[in-house]
Image (tube, rainbow, N blue to C red):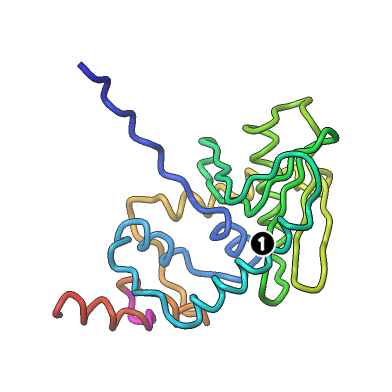
Amino acid sequence: MMDEEVPKPKRVGVTTLSKLMTGEDVCHLRPWYEKKHPNEAPPPGPELVKWQMNHTEVVTKLVMSLKGGEVERETWLSMDQPPVIGKADVIHQLPGGFHIYEAKSGRKANSHGLQLLIYLHIARKTLVGAGGPKLYGHLVYPDQQVDMGEDGIPLNLERMMTPHIEAILSPDAPRAVKSSGCRFCWADCPYAQNRAHVKKESGQ
């Protein structure tokens, strides 16, 4: 008799968290709704396809420039408490420590740095452990690289993440907040501009 598979705990994405924590996104309804209705996602548009191509180009150039050690692409980093998950673009393991790279093909944003610091925090807790190898973070843009260290991780990082995580994982829908992000949203909300796609697909 096979053992029953233990269900994986629900987690909130690092990118979503970093945008909410820096104020680049202000509405918790969108990620809350997307978790409960993933099949309603609209097909990729030309903007997303272009972003994916540009991002892949930046990551590929980065990997080709790294020397020695072990290189992993698209590595999931997650922890249960608080329940967060994200995919690091590149992890480069060298004798002197682990280097985590996050590639960005667009404009610089405050959420990028916080996203990388959360990755470093998760890696310290789950990948290398306390007292393990050193961790280094690198934000890679097409024309610049920004280096970050563990000393930049806020001491109260987990406490700062908690209210956002609780709102997104709550059984009750959070309040809708109108913002520029509404043009990408398909939540059941009067502000969501992709809601028309859902109605068309369902025949409403």
Q: Is disc 1 placed on a helix, strand or loop?
A: helix
Residue furthest out toward the left: 203
Q: Position of residue 110 (x, y in %)?
A: 72, 67
Residue at image position (75%, 60%) is 139
Residue at image position (51%, 53%) is 13
Residue bounds of the magenta highlight? 189-193
Q: Position of residue 125 (x, y in %)?
A: 66, 33
Residue at image position (49%, 76%) is 49
Mark 1 crowd level (few <14, some 14–19, many ≥20, 10 Å Cα): many
Residue at image position (74%, 26%) is 130
Res. 94 image quadrant: top right
Identify residue for label 1: 59
Out of 184 and 81, give the one closest to the viewer. Answer: 184
Placement of 31 over or under 130, stated as above or below: below
Identify which amino acid the numbered label 1 is placed on.
Val
- What is the quadrant of the C terminus in the image? bottom left
Q: Position of residue 136 (x, y in %)?
A: 80, 45
Decide whether residue 199 is among the magenta residues: no
Secondary structure predominantly adopted by residues drawn in magenta? loop
Decide whether residue 191 is among the magenta residues: yes
Q: Position of residue 54 (x, y in %)?
A: 61, 74
- What is the quadrant of the N terminus in the image? top left
Left or right of 7 on screen, residue 17: right
Left or right of 181 on screen, residue 203: left
